Amino acid sequence: MEDEGTNSQWRQRLDAGHAEYENGRYPAAEVEFAAALKVAERFGDSDLRLARTLNNLAVVYQLQGKYGFAEDSYLRALAVKRRALGDDNAEVAVELHNLAVLNSARRRFTEAEGYYRRALSMRGKHLGIDHPDYASTVAEFAKLMRRTGRADEAALFEARFRSARRPG
């Protein structure tokens, strides 16, 4: 069991990382999030603060083109969330979506598609198709389809999405 000082230390580093991120200073944000990670690791391997910290670190890695580090951090965050929440949860879908976007950026389209499909399934089930996070995944998945020469499939997919969202 951690003490309040440890949580406070983690929060300070996390907040500092967010401040650097918001100001576009990604290397400085990386330093702060890495420091927050060292503290968060004391909370245990199924603590959602650890997953949150890993996700934040992954984002700044990705923005800096450090894709391998980003992937490792997203995968680790995914594992933490699965331990804490189970395999089928809206929070787990966040990491799946992020991994899909990352893999698409790396031109690893087959992996990206698998992550998008799993994220869509979970987000649809837990958030509903009217939720902005579901819509975001639909939009990103459609971009992937277009990037891989499947514009017709993307258009059909988006049309089904719009049709399903219309009131009956």
Image (cartoon, helix red, strand yellow):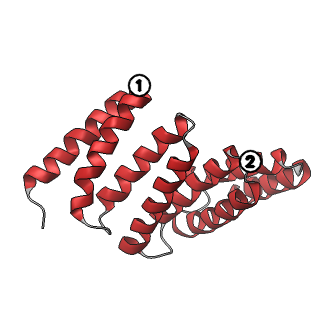
Q: Name the residue rendered at 53%, 35% in the picture.
A: 63
Q: Secondary structure at mark 1?
A: loop
Mark 1 vs 2, N-terminal side: 1
If the image is split into quadrants, where does the C terminus sit? bottom right
- Residue 37, which numbered label? none
Say whether residue 12 is visible.
Answer: yes
Sort mark 1 into few (<14), some (14-19) or many (20+) by Cα contacts within 10 Å: some
Relative to 71, is 79 on the left or the right? left
| Residue 108 against residue 85 in the figure, above or below | above
Q: Quadrant of residue 160?
A: bottom right
Q: At label 2, which amino acid type do we have?
A: Arg
Which of 38 and 58 lies nearest the eye of the viewer? 38
Which of 12 and 131 lies nearest the eye of the viewer? 12
Q: Name the residue rendered at 30%, 37% in the picture.
A: 32
Q: Secondary structure at mark 2?
A: loop
State the image coordinates of residue 111 (x, y, percent, origin top left). Answer: 70, 61
Q: At label 1, which amino acid type do we have?
A: Arg
- Residue 25, which numbered label? 1
Label 2 sits on residue: 107
If the image is split into quadrants, where does the N terminus sit? bottom left
State the image coordinates of residue 108 (x, y, percent, origin top left). Answer: 72, 53
